[in-house]
């Protein structure tokens, strides 16, 4: 043992080393706030700052406020404050953190309502997430993907049969206010629970009324869906930067499941408000305004977001993130700036019309204007077997619909087409919060397209279909299970369904009036 | 004729070059800078221009100008240690420290360079503790 060792010397050297570490850590790049207002802090200095880097600003009351850098200019930096600017003053010190914005991710987030920075809003205590992820991440490359081939069943018959959505697809829901856009999203989430698909839902409320979010949470809890849902909530009272970050934060949370061999569904409600929030930030950052005062990169904020929804290949686990962005139009104008942008990005759209809504056709889906570019690849064989001619039949019906008022003067084939179309239209009406299983959809559509329900009055077709589904569920459990697995029905299965449908149809058919007895002549 | 855009950085580069040139009249160039700031209504940004000039001096001559504000008079050893640390961190060939005492700091010191700051005051430590508590 060396005789030079001394506890005192050792202690002194250790203290000196600690002090050296402290002082070397203490040398931080700093800047100073030159002016602040409207949620933007303009900063002098920080020549090493990076784009999107998080900075901390020392406030006058001794605390710190976080901001992230969006403008890097020659003489100053524009940083967007993540909370109120009331405590930030000119002359405040600003420090770099060396990090970009991150959120907690992982299964610990499921069942929680959070803000875009991952802070809980539901009063259920802190979230002990084991992992964090940057809010902005690059989308998977070409070779990392696989084509969309598995369905996301929404439980809404009109969508699952004619506008099918697949896992990894981006399907836009677009329409005027109060046309049922969010209702479609909610029913889709509920259906994931009802059909036990295992898909995790992520609902991103962008600038939505908190009362609406609260009602949504309540409904999801009642349906038992909250156990597989994450809600990222921002209200109109939140600063625009939080509204801007919300969809990216939600996407980061959904991506965790995609990258870990699971499937997730993310709903952005709605991207119109997201674009408006970004416009506000850009104008305050003095970026040049373009069309409708939106900044030049308003397309990019949505394209890079939606590109992160993908189906991964088998080597990467085969997970998927399906996106249902929502866009609100004004007066049905789908050719406006933001709607056309997002339509060109997504893999199809579900267009909801106000006129259909007020005619009582709910969900108010315009089958003619709605499309899914993935199509049949995302449909189960069971649904595909019955949905083949549906769109065509309805298109033909729409063309002939104006002649319906002259039905007594039409040839029998035209009359039948009109009657069939009316029954299909009635069939596709569906109450909210009642998503249908695959079996229920197949069993409802099969007799309708094959004419078995032609004897049922149009307004009673829905009830007839419900009764038929109940009969099949009660007496033919194996068939029901087979259909719910997506298996194409065989000929004997079809015969079974049709036989039962005929019985149900007879019970709904109007009774024939007896011929009047001839009165004896006086 | 289009007017060339003047940025604070270009002005700082010019003035730094003149300050480093022993033959240039220092007072004249500082007056020019003051006139520019007044004319462009940026007189409140004089301090930033000073930092810009200090940065340019470092770039052009390798000399770092630093300010140290401490609660008590700093010993020569500590000043040398600070200078050595700054030289190591910034790559400057020479470090000139302008030290002042401010008893209001109570403990510790603040070292300021054009781009960096090192703050070991009690106030800063309290702020860090407060941030740590808020993030929990």
Image (spheres, rainbow, N blue to C red):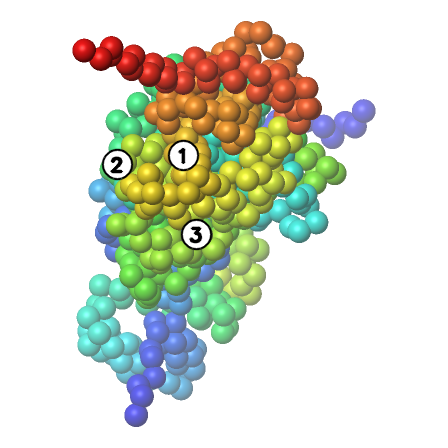
Characterize the local packing of mark 2: few (<14), some (14-19) or many (20 or more) Cα atoms within 10 angstroms.
few
Location of residue A297 in the rendering, given as x and y in whole percent from the top left corner: 42, 60
Is residue A92 or residue A366 the one in the foreground?
A366
Give the Cα separation between the discs numbered 2 and 1.
21 Å
3D distance between C-alphas at marks 3 and 1: 37 Å
Q: Position of residue A145 (x, y in %)?
A: 66, 45
Badge 2: chain ID: A
Q: Position of residue B84 (x, y in %)?
A: 54, 54
Residue A119 appears anywhere in the view = no
Left or right of residue A168: residue A146: right
Residue A333 in view: yes
Q: Which residue is mark 3?
A: A342
Circle 2 sits on which residue? A358
Above-or-below relation of B88 to B8: above
Q: Which residue is mark 1?
A: A419
Above-or-below relation of A182 to A68: above
* Residue A520 tag number: none
Q: Quadrant of residue A411?
A: top left
Secondary element type, mark 3:
helix
Q: Quadrant of the N terminus of chain B?
A: bottom left
Mark nearer the viewer, 3 or 1: 1
Question: Are marks 2 and 1 in one subunit?
Answer: yes
Residue at 22% x, 63% y: name it: B44
- Distance from label 2 to label 3 (Cα)? 26 Å
The residue sitting at 36% across, 15% down in the picture is A511
Q: Who comes first in sequence, dot 2 or dot 1?
A: 2
Q: Chain of mark 1?
A: A
């Amino acid at each position: 043992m060396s005789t030079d060792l001394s506890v005192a010397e050792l202690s002194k050297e250790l203290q000196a080393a600690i002090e050296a570490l402290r002082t070397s850590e203490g040398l931080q790049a700093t800047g100073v706030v030159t002016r602040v207002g409207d949620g933007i802090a303009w900063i002098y200095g920080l020549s090493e700052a990076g784009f999107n880097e998080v900075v901390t600003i020392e406030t006058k009351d001794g605390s710190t406020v976080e901001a992230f850098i969006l403008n890097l200019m020659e003489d100053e930096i524009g940083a967007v404050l993540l909370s109120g600017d009331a405590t930030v003053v000119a002359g405040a010190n600003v420090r770099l953190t060396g990090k970009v914005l991150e959120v907690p991710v992982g299964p610990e987030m499921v069942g929680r309502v959070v803000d875009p920075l991952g802070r809980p809003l539901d009063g259920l205590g802190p979230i002990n997430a084991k992992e964090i992820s940057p809010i902005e991440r690059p989308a998977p490359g070409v070779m990392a993907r696989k084509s969309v081939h598995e369905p996301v069943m929404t439980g809404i018959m009109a969508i699952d049969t004619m506008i099918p959505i697949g896992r990894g697809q981006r399907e836009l829901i677009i329409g005027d206010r109060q046309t049922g856009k969010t209702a479609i999203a909610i029913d889709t989430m509920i259906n994931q629970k009802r059909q036990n698909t295992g898909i995790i839902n992520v609902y991103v409320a962008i600038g939505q009324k908190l009362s609406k979010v609260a009602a949504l949470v309540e409904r999801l809890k009642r349906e038992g869906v909250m156990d597989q849902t994450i809600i990222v909530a921002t209200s109109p009272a939140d600063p625009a930067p939080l509204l801007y970050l919300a969809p990216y934060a939600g996407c980061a949370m959904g991506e965790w499941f995609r990258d870990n061999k699971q499937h997730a569904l993310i709903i952005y409600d709605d991207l119109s408000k997201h674009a408006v929030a970004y416009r506000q930030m850009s104008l305050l950052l003095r970026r040049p305004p373009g069309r409708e005062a939106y900044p030049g990169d308003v397309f990019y904020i949505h394209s890079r977001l939606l590109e992160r929804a993908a189906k991964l290949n088998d080597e990467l686990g085969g997970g998927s993130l399906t996106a249902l962005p929502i866009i609100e139009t004004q007066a049905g104008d789908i050719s406006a700036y933001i709607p056309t942008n997002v339509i060109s990005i997504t893999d199809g759209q579900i267009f909801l019309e106000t006129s259909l809504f007020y005619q009582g056709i709910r969900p108010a889906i315009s089958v003619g204007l709605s499309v899914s570019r993935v199509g049949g690849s995302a449909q189960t064989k069971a649904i595909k077997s019955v949905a083949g001619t549906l769109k065509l039949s309805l298109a033909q019906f729409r063309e002939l619909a104006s002649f319906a008022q002259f039905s007594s003067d039409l040839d029998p084939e035209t009359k039948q087409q009109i009657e069939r179309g009316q029954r299909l239209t009635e069939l596709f009406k569906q109450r909210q919060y009642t998503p249908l299983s695959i079996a229920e959809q197949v069993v409802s559509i099969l007799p309708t397209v094959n004419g078995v329900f032609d004897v049922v009055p149009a307004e009673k077709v829905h009830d007839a279909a419900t009764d038929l589904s109940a009969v099949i569920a009660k007496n033919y459990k194996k068939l029901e299970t087979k259909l719910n697995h997506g298996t194409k029905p065989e000929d004997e299965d079809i015969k079974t369904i049709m036989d039962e449908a005929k019985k149900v149809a007879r019970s709904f058919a109007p009774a024939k009036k007896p011929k009047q007895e001839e009165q004896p002549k006086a | 004729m289009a007017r060339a855009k003047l940025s604070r950085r270009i002005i700082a580069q010019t003035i730094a070059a003149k300050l480093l040139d022993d033959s240039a009249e220092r007072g004249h160039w500082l007056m020019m800078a003051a006139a520019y700031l007044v004319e462009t209504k940026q007189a409140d940004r004089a301090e930033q221009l000073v930092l810009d000039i200090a940065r340019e001096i470092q770039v052009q001559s390798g000399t770092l100008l630093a300010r140290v504000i401490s609660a008590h008079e700093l010993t020569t050893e500590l000043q040398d240690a600070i200078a050595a640390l700054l030289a190591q961190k910034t790559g400057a060939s020479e470090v000139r420290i302008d030290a002042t005492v401010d008893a209001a700091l109570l403990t510790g010191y603040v070292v300021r360079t054009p781009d960096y700051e090192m703050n070991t005051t009690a106030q800063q430590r309290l702020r860090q503790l407060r941030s740590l508590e808020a993030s929990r």
